[in-house]
Amino acid sequence: TILPSPLDEVAGVFHIKAYLVDDELILSGANLSEEYFSNRLDRYMLFTDGGGGLVDFYADLCDTLCSYAIKYDGQPSLLSTQSFDSTRKQQLESSLTRLFVDETRTILPDSCSHNDALDPVAYAIPTFQMPNSFLGRPFQFQSDNDASRDLLLAAVESEQNMSVRLSSAYLNLTPRLRSVLTMFGNKRGVGAPYVLTAGAMSHGFAPKKQTKSKQNNVGIVDKIKSSIPEAFLTLVKEASQSIIACGGKVLLYERQGWTFHAKGVWITANDTNTSRRELIHDPTSVVSTIIGSGNYGARSEDLDVESNCVIVFNEQSKGEPIQQSVANDWNNMCEHSTVTEDLDFRDDVNNLTNIVVQFMKKFL
């Protein structure tokens, strides 16, 4: 792409974040740039001792993607002349389909003990997302978007009183996702949705402080960059109207000196504490979480290459320490967040921000 960073991301990016060393795997939404090791908040989940086969699965996924990747030739330009024709694209689809739909694949490796196989702490379901534009149609196996939506619909239809919590670094809910989130508040006996995203202070696209000389030489690209956080806040306002209307809450993460990049889903059952309802008061109420790279927005759904992992806890096993950690992830983020109904959103959004929102909404 010829666009400057970070505007180049609107065209779609390879967004998967999976880190493998020996028989351990970290799934995250974080990159490896310096700020993630200091003051950029994200989520991480470590799978050890092979993770019941999950580590090998992601090793195979990375190997498959690498085998079809364009090799960087060391030249200054990243615009490669290597071809990626329709035949090669279909071969990649076939390889990924075999990986994700192989019914003969061993779920638990031989290294797992008999007790672990009979009583796992949780079940892990990896997902994958490729833009439809890659082949001009969806892949031949379930996408991450569909898997996430099916999980939410199953929670809505459950006989238990389920609530959903969703975090996105860049909140831009698609109508398809918003419709299922609001089911949690609109269906009798089902808990409300709670959504958390970055506020202006901690937004990942917040402009860096500049010297006075640079402030006097601001071009159109810089102006567009600086309008992105405000554009996202406009989208937050849109989301708030439907989420609050069904009894839910939208929260903005604001922490001085920090940027917010965490994403994920938390589903709880029968957590009936009415004090600060957005918090997870009982860790054992966590029945499922999603960890990975997806931001649950239009760009993530239509343009980016993503992989998440759906974790479903086994009610019969002793998974409380992990459930506690998952609940803490959410609760700690809430401690630095403000409910949007307590905020006064600006109605005098400038014209440039309106243009960014209207013409770039599907790219954000």
Image: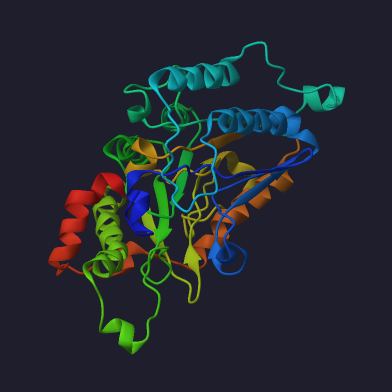
Query: Residue 61 occupies which quadrant of the picture?
Result: top right
Residue situated in front as seen by the camera: 181 or 198: 198
Question: Furthest-top residue in view?
Answer: 104
Q: Is residue 357 above or below residue 346?
A: above
Q: Is residue 219 above or below residue 191?
A: below
Residue displayed at 52% across by 56% down:
279
Query: Residue 41 occupies which quadrant of the picture?
Result: bottom right
Question: Furthest-bottom residue in view?
Answer: 212
Residue displayed at 79% across by 23% down:
109
Residue situated in front as seen by the camera: 67 or 358: 67
Q: Is residue 295 above or below residue 126?
A: below
Residue situated in front as seen by the camera: 269 or 169: 169
Residue situated in front as seen by the camera: 166 or 28: 28
Residue displayed at 51% across by 44% down:
293
Give x and y (percent) for residue 98: 57, 16
- Decide if residue 314 is in sight here: no
Q: How many marks?
A: 0
Give x and y (percent) for residue 277: 46, 55
Q: Is residue 357 above or below residue 19?
A: below
